[in-house]
Amino acid sequence: MRNSSCTPAWRKLVCALFIFPLLFGCRAIPPAVSRSDDIMPHTRNEQDRNGEYSLESMAPGPIKVIELNALPDSDAIIPRLMDKQVVFIGERHTRFADHLNQLAIIRGLHDRGKELAIGMEFFQQPFQPYLDAYSDKSIASGPDDTALLSHTEYYDRWRYDYRLYRPILHFARERGIPLIALNISSEIVKKVSEAGWDGLTGVELAEVPQSIDRSNKRYEQRLRGIFRHHPRRQHPGRGTDKQATVPTGKKQSARHPVGARGADGQSGGHRGRLSGERDRTDFQRFMDVQLLWDESMAERAAKYLTEHPGRTLVVLAGSGHLAYGDGIPDRVRRRVPVESAIILPAHDIANDIGADTESVPGNPSEIADFLLVSGDRALPPAGTLGVLLETDAEGIRITSFTPQSPARDAGMKEGDHLVRIDSRPIETMAHVKLALWDKRSGDRVSVELRGIDGAGSVKEMRLEVVLK
């Protein structure tokens, strides 16, 4: 996790950044939603003679200073986590350093004798049996990484480079630490996103949390800020890839959210609807999906904590699900009274939890108990075929090549279909990623193809490709 280009204070393995009241204990339940007068406490009666605010009236309050040269190492916070029943550690999914930092906290707790379990956003609940088999040391021939990825449909449902998470899973497996799939199935998320709660079947409703807390207006405000900047953003696990390059290498709780619709009371759209009404419906669906993720992961975490009171659950999830306690943490505590702590990466927090200043509460010390500061760390480059692929009726078709493509150099042509990679059948984009996830530049793979020869006849061929 070290970065030689960073200053000494930032080159620590993981630094715990204590801000404002965080020096004096872990967070409490967040206060009521912030108002404009939290930031500018003076009224318009305090305007100057020209009708403008004076500099004094615009003062934001006491200014706090962070002394970077005094930042402690991550080991300094481990003793303060030892009495917690759940520790939430945030991440930006694609940042390897965040996952190494998560592992550092997990290792610190384990080395001090804590009985742990690790709850993970990136696996979905229906696949829990495969995680159990993976982490069970009593199974001599348990599934390896590739089998785990295949059985859990990882590259269909999450898609981020598995190598980001592999050190955590290997640590857990070697030490017999249970792995808990927190997330709800992407099929249910997709239905709620497209058709609302009314689109779910009775069987699917049974998998949805029995109560959804919509009372947190501060969280809604932050979600609106995110929605305004990314109104059509897709989350991994939703939809299907049509084209891809292959490197790859809180209290207004409602009993079932049945009947919940957009802000305009409509469950669907039509051509004549005003754009403002459509935006309100789109945001309602966006928020429904976010709450579905939060409540589902919180319910699964609370269930595990109730069933295993002797273990500390470490929850690994995107920072947006944890910041200010609004997403998963407060919803866990609503279900089960536990002592907890929230730890977030300090980098680029605004992008993780809300894209504009209007969506950020006035007291930033509420964001977490600890912030982690560290340099970045890159994964080794993945081995690549150097192709652009598309899904069609016949399977996975090559549409073009990257510059200096090893696949083209080996003899592949546009329009060829992938049949197998190293004897693994290829029918979907996920199969391609599964075949290449652990390959590095210089590795050699055998690729079977189906294409058209010069006479217009279908031919099959096998080529050896040295990945770049």
Image (cartoon, rainbow, N blue to C red):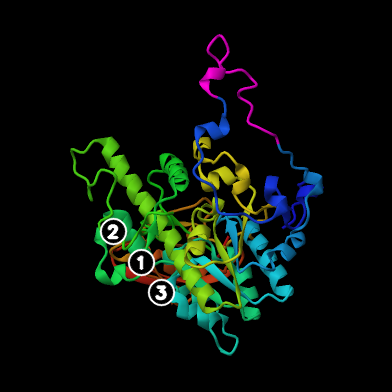
- Mark 2 belongs to which amino acid? Trp
| Residue 378 or residue 402, whichever sits in front | 378
Q: Residue at x 31, y 40 (%)?
A: 279
Left or right of 63, for residue 129? left
Q: Which callout, 3 or 2, points at the residue further toward the start of the chain?
A: 3
Q: Does the magenta-highlighted stretch encompass residue 421? A: no
Where does residue 135 sit, x and y in percent of width and height? 57, 80
3D distance between C-alphas at marks 1 and 2 = 10 Å
Residue at far front of view: 45
User: Which residue is nearer to you in this view: 432 or 415?
Assistant: 432
**Measured along the vertical axis of the image, is residue 362 above or below residue 203?**
above
Sequence-wise, the earlier of marks 3 and 1 is: 3
Q: Which amino acid type is shown beneath numbered disc 3? A: Pro
Q: How far apart are marks 3 and 2 (CA)?
A: 20 Å
Foreground disc of the pair 3, 1? 1
Is most of the magenta stretch helix, strand or loop?
loop
Q: Quadrant of the N terminus?
A: bottom right
* Disc assigned to residue 197: 2
Magenta range is 43-63
Residue for badge 1:
208
Asked which quadrant contains residue 208, the reply is bottom left
Residue 242: x %, y % from top left: 36, 56
Q: Are the residues tagged 1 and 2 within 8 Å (C-beta)?
A: yes
